[in-house]
Amino acid sequence: MPTIVVDVMPKAELLDPQGKAVAGALQRLGHAGFGDVRIGKRFELTVDTADEQTLAAVRTIAEEILSNSVIEDVVGIEVVE
Amino acid sequence: MTVRVGVITFPGSLDDGDARRAVRLAGAEPVALWHGSHDLEGVDALVLPGGFSYGDYLRAGAIAALAPIMSEVKDAAAKGMPILGICNGFQMLVEAHLLPGGLIRNAHQQFIRRDQRLVVENADTAWTSEFRRGQEIVIPLKNADGGYIASDETLARIQGENLVAFRYAGVNPNGSMDDIAGLTNEHGNVVGLMPHPEHAIEPGFGPDTAVAMRSGVDGLSFFTAAVSAVVHSAA
């Protein structure tokens, strides 16, 4: 069955406390050369067919349920066979 | 008249029992409601209680905001019913777009529990009418996702329309923009806040105050205010 992958990230202009904590840990461990770390979410939706209609439905689901546009952006929707 | 206040239980609600108790101490009849139903059982006001509905999966309050009963909650909100969202309930109200903005993980990444000083910024809502604008109250705060955020445009609207109900006083415990602890909608019937008024209703079991340990009962006024609002609107 085809899988549709949806990627959601916290909005760039907003503080990402999780990412900040990881960035702090990297620095403590001596990994030089890394700046910000930002943590997002990846959703994998298996579908019967990845046709245009299904993709349109996924776009709506991604905007209205999987993400909250106040705090997050949908940064990618792609079909993975 | 006996005012009936519904408290909706979601999977993972924790403070529904305390909220029902607060309703009873405020002189009203608590009505236990279930998230999976479409029936508000004719209640006069509603409380969305604190807890960790659906384990905070997806986003805090996000899945609960899509629960069956939430369509009735939205209708009731539009008709002016007093609705209070406490902590996880506040998160549900923003996820359901009944209040503006969003809530994210506390800036310091940790769960916090403290007796929190708040300043009442709007005393003209169904839940705050027993306070004065500028009054300081103490309400327990306990959450992981309490950081209030909104776009600059939304923040300007919140300011302009006087939608901030409460601000954190003394210290901003979670990185909330503009020290926002709670909001109201334009009509003043829907109010949400991160601190827990239902934990400050009875001497001996409330937050510490300058007067005595565990003596804080500022939370009771939220519930008595809503009861008065219902009685006045019925009169």
Image (cartoon, grey):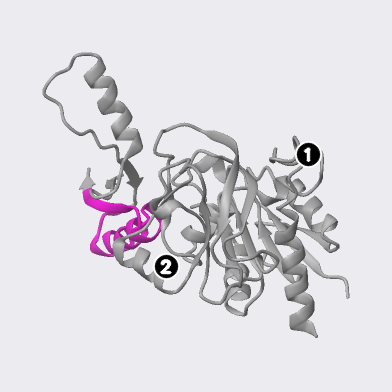
Residue at 75% across, 35% down: B213
Span shown in magenta: A49-78
CA neighbours of label 2 inside 10 A, class few (<14), some (14 to 19), many (20+): many
Q: Earlier in the sequence, mark 2 or mark 1?
A: 2
For disc 1, the chain is B
Residue at the bottom extreme of this rendering:
B235
Across and down, in percent, residue A43 comes to 33, 44
Residue A23 versus residue B213: which sits nearer the camera? B213
Residue at 56% across, 67% down: B122
Residue at 77% across, 49% down: B201
Indicate the quadrant containing the N terminus of chain A: top left, top right, bottom left or bottom right. Answer: top left
Look at label 2 and name its amino acid. Ile
Which numbered tag is attached to residue B158?
2
Q: Secondary structure at mark 2?
A: helix
Residue at the front extreme of this rendering:
B211
Residue B166 seen:
yes
Residue at 45% across, 47% down: B59
Residue at the right extreme of this rendering:
B1
Residue B42 seen:
no
- The residue that disc 1 covers is B205
Answer left or right for B44 relative to B144: right
Answer left or right for B35 relative to B163: right
**Residue B158: quadrant of the picture:** bottom left
Q: Secondary structure at mark 1?
A: loop
Whether the magenta-drawn stretch holds residue B220 is answered as no
